[in-house]
């Protein structure tokens, strides 16, 4: 009997150890995303990806704390500090957050000796398990399915690259750079900034681009069945076209410089002698003045839309679909 116990106990301990190892490996596994997943809205990424919402949690770059990564509930409660990285182009899917870091502040200079200034990073929702997926200067990060597409530079050549969510299979997609804000099913839709300003479709896997809409456009975003863009031939009016019926609609007066489409709402900024931020329904009705100032960024989430002006770092918020009562939103550094 005692001899049997001597064999049973070691075997039991081995099983426990194996279970712990398997559990640890599973906890670190990076599961695939659905192919149709995108990491952030095109409108938010056009404003630098400073805010990103997923499953009721908002991840954001805190302007009052050198752009460090924070999170909060959608109602702006439960604010948490997550990372010392100065972050932009935040994307999120599943249990992970992806972002570009640009640690160029003076207190980050020691990071230079660890090659830790720039890169594409993945972490968990609590900021843990940070991993640099791609090093070097990066910008315009967007997640589509299981691919991250971003712009990068080796100091002499700027390129568009892609890498998978595990940090593998890095590929040069193009020897040119584009706005990657509008992504869908492995394709990027963008206004060309070269010889013409038509809208192109860039296939990430095939590494090839093709004409999508002939026109003189800026800041094109494909959202559902509509292509939104600033029409340079119509005094920079915000315009949309139904890609199925080809019906075209003008949504704003002249001078649109920035916009963000969120569900059935659009926030847009008119840059004129009387600069102002407005909100309107996607069908062009319900125009509402939000603030008469020059606007630098517009970030929409389910409950609040956040924006900053060009003259200071003050962060403002307004209910995304509610009353247009603007509030200063201050986040105490943690």
Image (cartoon, rainbow, N blue to C red):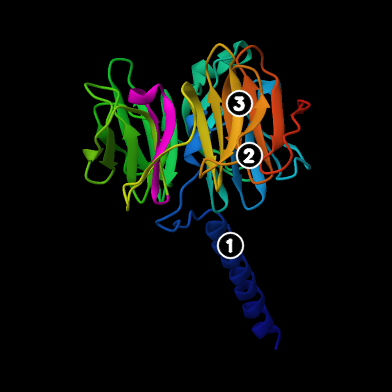
Q: Position of residue 49 (x, y in %)?
A: 53, 33
242 is within the stretch colored magenta = no
Q: Are marks 2 and 3 in contact (CB under 8 Å)?
A: no
Q: Which residue is mark 3?
A: 277
* Residue 59: assigned label: 2
236 is within the stretch colored magenta = yes
- Looking at the image, is mark 2 or mark 1 earlier in the sequence? 1
Q: Residue at x 34, y 34 (%)?
A: 190
**Residue 23 location, quadrant:** bottom right
Q: How many marks?
A: 3
Provide the secondary structure element on which disc 1 rests: helix
Please identify the residue farthest to the bottom as the structure is shown: 1
Q: Position of residue 113 (x, y in %)?
A: 50, 16
Provide the secondary structure element on which disc 2 rests: strand
**Residue 291 location, quadrant:** top right
Q: Which residues are magenta?
A: 224-240
Provide the secondary structure element on which disc 3 rests: strand
Q: In the image shown, does 93 or 20 lie closer to the viewer?
A: 93
Left or right relative to 280: residue 38: left
* Residue 73: assigned label: none
Q: From the viewer's perspective, is the residue at label 2 or at label 1 nearer?
A: 2
* Residue 23: assigned label: 1
Q: Are marks 1 and 3 in contact (CB under 8 Å)?
A: no
- Looking at the image, is mark 1 or mark 3 earlier in the sequence? 1
Q: Position of residue 172 (x, y in %)?
A: 27, 34
Q: From the viewer's perspective, is the residue at label 1 or at label 3 nearer?
A: 3
Task: Determine the CA span between mark 1 and mark 3.
Answer: 50 Å
Left or right relative to 150: residue 281: right
Q: Residue at x 41, y 35 (%)?
A: 239
What is the quadrant of the C terminus in the image?
A: top right
- Looking at the image, is mark 2 or mark 3 earlier in the sequence? 2
């Amino acid at each position: 009997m005692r001899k049997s116990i001597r064999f049973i106990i070691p075997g039991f301990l081995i099983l426990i150890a194996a279970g712990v190892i398997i559990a640890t490996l599973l906890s670190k596994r990076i599961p695939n995303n659905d192919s149709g997943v995108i990491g952030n809205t095109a409108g938010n990424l056009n404003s630098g990806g400073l805010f990103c919402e997923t499953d009721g949690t908002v991840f954001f770059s805190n302007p009052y704390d050198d752009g460090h990564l924070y999170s909060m509930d959608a109602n702006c409660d439960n604010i948490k500090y997550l990372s010392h990285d100065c972050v932009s182009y935040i994307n999120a899917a599943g249990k992970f957050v992806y972002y570009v870091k640009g640690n160029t502040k003076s207190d980050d200079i020691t990071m230079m000796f660890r090659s830790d200034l720039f890169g594409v990073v993945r972490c968990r929702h609590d900021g843990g398990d940070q991993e640099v997926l791609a090093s070097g200067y990066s910008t315009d990060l967007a997640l589509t399915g299981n691919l991250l597409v971003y712009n990068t530079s080796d100091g002499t050549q700027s390129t568009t690259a892609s890498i998978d969510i595990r940090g593998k299979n890095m590929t040069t997609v193009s020897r040119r750079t584009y706005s990657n804000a509008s992504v869908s099913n492995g394709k990027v839709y963008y206004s060309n900034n070269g010889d013409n300003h038509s809208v192109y479709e860039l296939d990430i896997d095939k590494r090839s681009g093709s004409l999508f809409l002939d026109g003189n456009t800026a800041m094109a975003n494909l959202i559902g069945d509509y292509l939104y863009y600033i029409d340079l031939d119509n005094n920079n009016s915000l315009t949309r076209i139904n890609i199925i019926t080809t019906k075209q609609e003008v949504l704003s007066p002249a001078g649109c410089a920035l916009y963000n489409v969120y569900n059935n709402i659009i926030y847009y900024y008119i840059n004129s002698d009387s600069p102002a931020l407005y909100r309107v329904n996607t069908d062009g009705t319900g125009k509402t003045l939000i603030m008469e100032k020059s606007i630098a960024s517009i970030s929409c989430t389910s409950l609040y839309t956040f924006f900053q002006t060009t003259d200071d770092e003050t962060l403002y918020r307004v209910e995304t679909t509610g009353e247009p009562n603007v509030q200063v939103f201050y986040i105490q550094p943690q």
